[in-house]
Image (spheres, coloured by chain):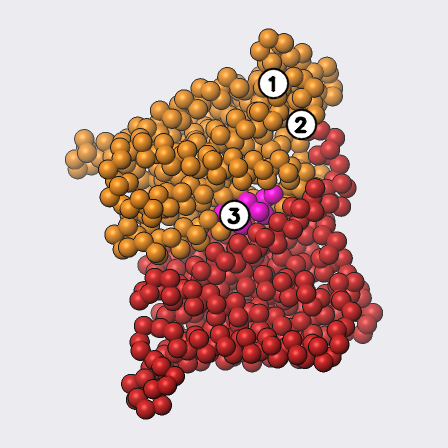
Amino acid sequence: MSPTRPAGPPAASLVGRAAPAPDSATGSVRPALGDPSRPVGDRSRLMLLALLALAAAAGYLLLGLHGNIGYALTRRATTLATLGVVGTAIALSTVLFQTATHNRILTPSVMGFDALYLFVQTLGVAVFGVGATRQLPPLARFGLEVAVMLGFSLGLYGWLIGRLARRIHLLVLIGMVCGVFFRSLTQFVQRILDPTEFVVVQDAMFADFTDADTTLLGIAAVVVGLVAVAARRLFPRLDVMSLGHDPAISLGVDHRRMTVVVLVMAAVLVSVSTALVGPTTFFGLLVVHLGYRLVRTGWHRTTVPAAIGVAFVVLVAGQLLLERVLGLDSVLAVAVEFLGGLAFLLLLTRRPR
Amino acid sequence: MSARTLAPSRDVRQVTDPAGPSAGPVAGVRPRRGRAASAGLLTLGVLLVAGLTGISLFVGVGQLHPATVLHDETQQMLLVQSRVPRTVALLLAGAAMAVAGTIMQLLARNRFTEPSTAGTTEFAGLGIVAATLVVPDAPLIVRMAAASAAALVGSAVFLRIIRGLPTRETLLVPLVGLMLGGVVSAATTFVALRTDLMQSLTSWLTADFSVVIAGRYELLWAAGAVTLLAYLAADRFTVAGLGEDVTTSLGLDYRAVMGLGLAIVSVVTAVVVVTVGAVPFIGLVVPNLVALWVGDHARRSLVWTALGGMAFVLLSDLVARTVVAPAEIPLGTVVGVVGAGLFLALLGRQVVRAR
């Protein structure tokens, strides 16, 4: 069954040689220098990716500048920052989520996290009215939405994932139908709203990577930064976790607690990206798999930067290509959805090797 | 990484739904009820749908009372031009989509298949967009033909893909279908965005019966006729649901039955999408609820499925019309909420079984 193919470090690094001994104090796994599980190639590949990202960013900022240069640069920089924050949030949340669920076709978006966030947001407007939600400072509003979303996602998905860990197709199907359910529910609530409120929330339903709110962008950048730092500290434990439930426990990782922590992080990151640009379904899946392909190991300190780098490059290069070369504004989300959906189909239908 | 994830057999066994049609529909057929009892139940069902139809006729913004309608020309006009067409459209679309779902499930040999979980709906949308691009002022019938053709291609592609799946896992099939639909709809959205058809596309993809008046829904009678055809050929689909080998050994041309079934499903989906917009999940929820009760014998259950589809749509439409009256919510949205909720409930039965 291909979709549940092993996640994490390649088997060779565990079977072929003794597993690296966990450092008892920190629970971290420190591979020796020259560890065959970390080919030297990965470092240069990541460097190359970073250069590509830089080139894409520079290209996006500078290509075809004319007219009011200051204004154009500010706008482009805002978009670039949005793409960076969103790319990081989606890539990181997807890798974390896949590690925690031991599955490489699950992503928070596929499981309906974005739809849930939009629903919480719409419900907020419906219950308190658009005036009340506008009066709240953006940070408070965002915090409130994230808190409600956390409650929901931990309750629902924590229960589902705990229960269905071994029935991955059922889990994915339920997640996708949950997505449809929350989206329809959101539309339903929107229709009950009065027209002004409707306009306010309707805008959030489609992913748009440009024109993000700068205040929100600042908050989002800080939140994503904090989560990323926290996640960085967890990388060693995540590496152990990706060995599977039983090995992780026998190696001293509290699997249940880590699953909750990762779910919380994923929910926060998805909230950030959804609040900034709207829902995306398959983008995370696409970039994370490109990232996995790019590097040869499953160590989080390598895969996470790779996934984030790929996300950034895909977003910026895609935006550059669509906006400047093809003259298509705001269809990046659609294009990404198409490619990501194809990738997902391939993953689902591929025959076991 | 663990040995558990590497050993597929366990998962396969667990995921394969023993009650699914692929596991043998005949086993699922309940013993025949007494004829008198089932006839009585059927009468009850018909009466229920008739009652809902009556309510549907007399609920709405315009004043319409059963007592005065005979003497008031304005009311008669309202009845003939708006209320009757709408209610008839609801009945036809509900029955047709529910029956199409049953047939799709037999053809795919999977309980969780229906036009909106097999990409058929999205392919029909693609067909309409393509037709609108090629012939800008295409008459309805051209659009319908294009949508049918695209839906047919789409369903065939879907069946081909699920044939090639590593194992016949019950839940992988709707997953692949949903994904196929997502990919196709992304492509359609891309084309629609480029050609300013986005608004039309949205209306095709969400059913809205507020547009139904006399002269704008009659194509749905074709869906009704095709549904009747499906009923007449029901036994063949039941046999086809047993698989290619059994079908052939029972003396039926498997490919012909598959072709007929695909044509029926595609035409029904295309007609409904073109006239009122997609009505999701009915073909999935209704046949499953009926099968829980009546079993999998297609011809016996199809009547119930059709009645169930009608009742489902009529009820959803009443909700759509009354919750925010005098405005209304598109039916597709209401059905999306109720249908997805019921779908989750059906899946929840598997969650319980997983324990």
Q: Amino acid at mark 3?
A: Cys
Segment tinted magenta in the rendering: A171-180
Circle 1 chain: A
Residue placed at 44% from the left, 24% from the top? A227
Q: Colour of chain A?
A: orange
Q: Which mark is residue A245?
A: 2
Spot the red chain and give its letter.
B
Circle 3 chain: A
Q: Amino acid at mark 1?
A: Arg
Q: Is residue B256 magenta?
A: no
Predominant SS along the magenta part: helix
Q: Could you classify mark 1 by the number of other residues whose Cα lies within 10 Å: few (under 14), some (14-19), or many (20 or more)?
A: many
Q: CA distance from mark 3 to mark 1?
A: 39 Å
Q: Position of residue B136 (x, y in %)?
A: 35, 69
What is the secondary structure assignment of the residue under circle 1? loop
Q: Amino acid at mark 2?
A: His
Q: CA distance from mark 3 to mark 2?
A: 26 Å
Q: Are marks 2 and 1 on the same chain?
A: yes
Q: Is residue A204 above or below residue A264?
A: below
